[in-house]
Amino acid sequence: MIARLVREPLLQFLALGGVLFALYSLVGERGTEETEKIVVSASRVANLADGFARTWRRPPSPEELQGLIDNYVRDEVFYRAGRAAGLDRDDVIIRRRVRQKMEFLAEEISVPEPTDEQLAAYLASDPERFRNQDRLTFRQLFLSSSRRAGTIERDVKQVAAALSGAGAEVDATELGDPFLLGEEFRSMSQPDVARTFGDSFAKQVFAAERGRWQGPIESSFGQHFVFVGQRTKGSVPALDAIRPEVARQWADARRIEAEQKLYRSLRARYEITVEAASPRTTAGR
């Protein structure tokens, strides 16, 4: 019912009329007072010209620069009149934009260059964040589910028997089917394997024993037998090896800390009161 009323042309016309009336009344009141000043500073003109140059890869002409200045003055005039008329109140979009600008200001607080001691302490405080992933090197023997649609179960049993007790030197081309990405996969992390074969396959391969054929392990392509030849345990690199990444995350943490500190200091200036919603309002949600 309320939504239908809001869409009514007559109601929209009346609301617009009310806003225009408030604005014209404001202009009439201001006419008897001292004229407000809008100063377009030299730095503002330079910023307008720089913004134009970044967009168009050339400086603006005198006419274009004057157009930018005129547009800025137009924005300022309407912005001030709108605020005076209360148009910015309870506007979610405006509130969010102002909040974002405040957060950007907090993030732009200069973060000093970290010392080696600070980076080393940051790395030591959460080493798992920077740990290299475990990696495997494995061979696979592939049985295509599409090629062997009617014989896949029988063929799996035959290949399993043939691989029992065999080593890595087995010729996979004689027992299995060609696989587009090849037979051997070197130094693969679990996410790497998952991107190729799927999550379930990757988990089973990384849980497999080293040094013997195991399977079948199913993927979306078909059935696979795998031989894990090498397993490399993940480790935390030395600071010198990952200094840029540690420095980046250290700076991000400092910016977040600065934003939270600014918010706490601003919030402390206010007494926050949250009124309980009426039963009718709650039921209408």
Image (cartoon, rainbow, N blue to C red):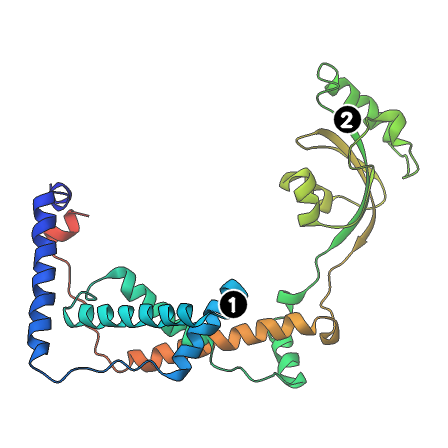
Few, some or many C-alpha atoms within 10 Å of disc 1 (few <14, some 14-19, many ≥20)?
A: few
**Residue at x-position 40% and y-position 69%:** 63
Question: Quick one: 86 or 284, which is closer to the camera?
Answer: 86
Few, some or many C-alpha atoms within 10 Å of disc 2 (few <14, some 14-19, many ≥20)?
A: many
Compare marks 1 and 2 and give the one earlier in the sequence.
1
**Residue at x-position 41% and y-position 68%:** 64
Q: Answer with left or right where residue 25 lies relative to residue 57.
A: left
State the SS at label 1.
helix
Q: Which label lies toward us, 1 or 2?
A: 1
Question: Quick one: 233 or 164, which is closer to the camera?
Answer: 233
Quadrant in which the N terminus appears: top left
How many numbered circles are shown? 2
Task: Give the vertical position of 253 relative to 35 (above or below).
Answer: above
Specify the label residue 231 is tagged with.
none
* Three-letter amino acid code at the position of disc 2: Leu
Q: Residue 73: x and y, percent?
A: 29, 72
Location of mark 1 (residue): 54
Q: Residue 58: x and y, percent?
A: 53, 67
Image quarter of residue 41: bottom left
Task: Give the vertical position of 174 relative to 189 (above or below).
Answer: above
Location of mark 2 (residue): 143
Whether residue 12 is visible here, answered yes or no, is yes
**Residue at x-position 13% and y-position 52%:** 281
- The reply to whether callout 1 and callout 2 are in contact (CB within 8 Å) is no
Q: Residue 230: x and y, percent?
A: 83, 50
* Three-letter amino acid code at the position of disc 1: Arg
**Residue at x-position 26% and y-position 60%:** 92
State the SS at label 2.
strand
